[in-house]
Image (tube, rainbow, N blue to C red):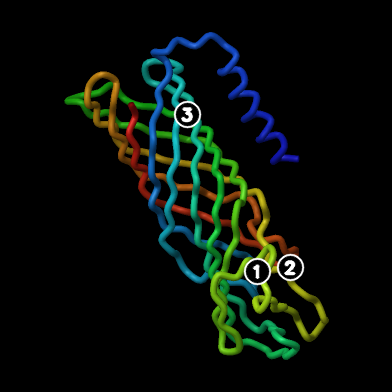
Amino acid sequence: MKLKLFLSILLLSISRIGLSQINEDKLEFGLGITPCLSWVNSSTKMLKSGGSAMSFGFGAKINFKLSSKYALGFEVNLQNIKAKTNFTGIDVEYNGIKKTSSNFDLDYKLKYIDLPVLLKMHTEPKNNIAIFGEFGASLGFLLNQLADVSSNELNLEQVNTQNPEDGDNFTLSNSSNGEKYSIKMNTLKVGLIFGSGIHYHLGNGSKVELGLRYNLGLTDIYDEKKWTGTSHNLGLNLGFIF
């Protein structure tokens, strides 16, 4: 329900801007890249974070100026996120053989279309430099999910965890109660964005954007009820506004 409400607000905001008569001077268009560190936080005992990993994203941005110091920002980003996860005391079945693994790693490589909506604030430029801050929310749609499997019993690369290819099928389970676990990921994720940095004004309205951005994951990224995890990332926000 919360995801549907978020998406409805996003679409309504875009529609109102698109249907209203907008002064061209109030619009800014730009491109950006976001190299970052990503990691997973979990509150489940059998699932632990495997640490942080370098990730990368890029996309386009549109800013609609509300006043001289405030703007509403919309972005469309192709975001690659890595999620390292470690399982303890889990049973692995592969090619009909079941073994208990004391250390089983799944290093996910996830690709999202990420749609941030941001309130942006900035100071008046001084010596062509202005300080900015941003706050908002993001909605991510999962496009692709691959994982590298590493354990004493099994090692596989580039496993499609949504639809495994021949030779990549394995099962995770708990021999004490017979439960089987899914390694699929949820198709949607929601996060809060906090950021700040500087704008360097080049003239004619163009500027370079250099800042830090933190994306705080709010929703479970795993499609499995027995464990939960949220994805977070912290990185550079590098952009150019035309």
Vertical order, 164 against 15 (above or below): below
Look at 66% across and 71% down and name the residue there.
165
Tell me residue 115's x, y (percent).
55, 38
The answer to the question of whether label 1 and label 2 lie on touching residues, with beta carbons closer than 8 A, is yes
Q: Earlier in the sequence, mark 1 or mark 2?
A: 1
Q: Quadrant of residue 33?
A: top left
Vertical order, 62 against 140 (above or below): above
Q: Please give the residue where the numbered disc 3 appears in the rendered image.
A: 73
**Residue 226 tag number:** 2
Q: Earlier in the sequence, mark 3 or mark 2?
A: 3
Image side of residue 54 versus residue 86, left or right: left
Q: Please give the residue where the numbered disc 1 appears in the rendered image.
A: 44
Image side of residue 50 versus residue 69, left or right: right
Q: Residues within 10 Å of mark 1 (few under 14, many from 20)?
A: few
Image side of residue 58 versus residue 161, left or right: left
Secondary structure under the numbered disc 3 in the rendered image? strand
Give the spatial CA distance, label 1 vs label 2.
8 Å
Q: Quarter holding the C terminus? A: top left
Q: Earlier in the sequence, mark 3 or mark 1?
A: 1
Look at 40% across and 47% down and name the residue there.
34
Q: Quadrant of residue 190?
A: top right
Q: Amino acid at mark 1?
A: Thr
Looking at this view, is 192 or 149 the one in front? 149
Tell me residue 38's x, y (percent).
47, 58
Vertical order, 201 against 186 (above or below): above
Q: Amino acid at mark 3?
A: Gly
Give the spatial CA distance, label 3 vs label 1.
36 Å
Looking at the rendered image, the disc whose residue lies closer to the viewer, 3 or 2, is: 3
Tell me residue 24's x, y (percent).
42, 13
